[in-house]
Image: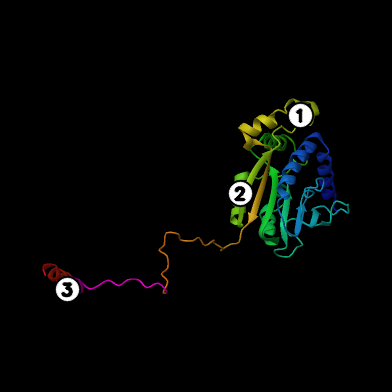
Amino acid sequence: MSIATSLNQNQQQAWFTSNAGQYLQVKEQALYDQAVFDLFGFNALQMGCAQMDLLRNSRIPNRFVASEFATSTAQNHLSCSDDFLPFSEMSLDLLLLPHRLEFSERPHQTLREAARVMMPEGHLLISGFNQLSLWGAAAGFKKAFSNKAIYPWNGKFIGLARLKDWLALLGFEVLSVEMCCHVPPFEQSSWHQRFSFMDKVSGRRCAMLGGVYFIVAKKRIVGMTPIKPHWKLAPLKTPLIVSPTRSKPSQNSLLEQQNIKIQHK
């Protein structure tokens, strides 16, 4: 492990133990617990953020946790890069990317790898920091006035609209988007308690300004369109029912003349 990698790992672990980090874990854990409970399959992978057991509520039998750091902890099953996953094509039914895209060197490649390893109709869950929030403003402020921004403010936050476009290009359908962490990222617990009301107020009136977005997307099969019945078309005629034949105009006229003669008689 390089010195830079070890430093990043230590910064990440230290931040998750801070007041803002613990606040984020509580909010995101609730969203992941609710989302994974109703998703089924055989193989599920959580990529990164091993501090949180985001698959604990999943009913998928094979659940794995991968880390971008080469560590041998009990929480991680393997260490790998998120832009080259060591899995075969269409082998995962559920993939979790908690705060991986903003810290990936190539976020486009990370999403392409996600599309490659996922089964058709598989689900992709992504959580990331929202640019249009107080969390995004804090990251911009620290980058502008500090030469050494540490985790998580050193990441490249991706806008929600841009991420939706990337997912659509790769064949993913966004099923739902939720926002959390409306309280500013205060490090002091006293300030955090003073602004705790923002979770209720902002969650109702300006939900899209939350510090973290949570996306549930599904991988669709390209080129497959459902066939809908044409209810307005006329029903097919069966050959077993004999339809009545129309008589010729000449026959009709002859019958009318014969009826007239009978009446006169």
Q: Does residue 58 appear anywhere in the picture?
A: yes
Task: State which quarter of the image contains the N terminus.
Answer: bottom right
Residue 16 position in % (x across, y down): 81, 40
Mark 2 residue type: Lys
Q: How many marks?
A: 3
For the residue pair 104 and 196, the one nearer the viewer reads as 196
Q: Horizontal placement of 107 versus 189: left or right?
A: left
- Residue 175 location (% of width, % of height): 62, 49
Query: With respect to residue 168, does 195 lie above or below?
Result: above
Q: Kindly indicate whether the residue at mark 1 contacts the one at mark 2 (C-beta within 8 angstroms).
A: no
Q: How far apart are marks 2 and 1 (CA)?
A: 31 Å
Magenta segment: does it hold 243?
A: yes
Front-most of 259 and 240? 259
Occupied quadrant, residue 168? bottom right
Judge by depth and name the residue closer to the eye, 86 or 118.
118
Q: Residue furthest front?
A: 265
Mark 2 falls on what kind of element?
helix
- Of pointers 3 and 1, the one earlier in the residue sequence: 1
Mark pair 3, 2: CA separation: 77 Å
What range of the chain is rendered magenta?
Answer: 240-255
Q: Which amino acid does label 3 sit on?
A: Leu
Q: Residue at x 82, y 52 (%)?
A: 69
- Mark 3 vs mark 1: in front: 3
**Which residue bears the numbered disc 3?**
254
Residue under circle 2? 164
- Work out whether mark 3 precedes mark 2 in sequence or the reverse, and give the earlier one: 2
Residue 256 image offset from top left, x and y in percent? 17, 69
Location of the C terminus (image quadrant): bottom left
Q: Quadrant of residue 199?
A: top right
Q: Label 3, secondary structure: give it.
A: helix
Rendered image quadrant of residue 262: bottom left
SS at mark 1?
Answer: helix
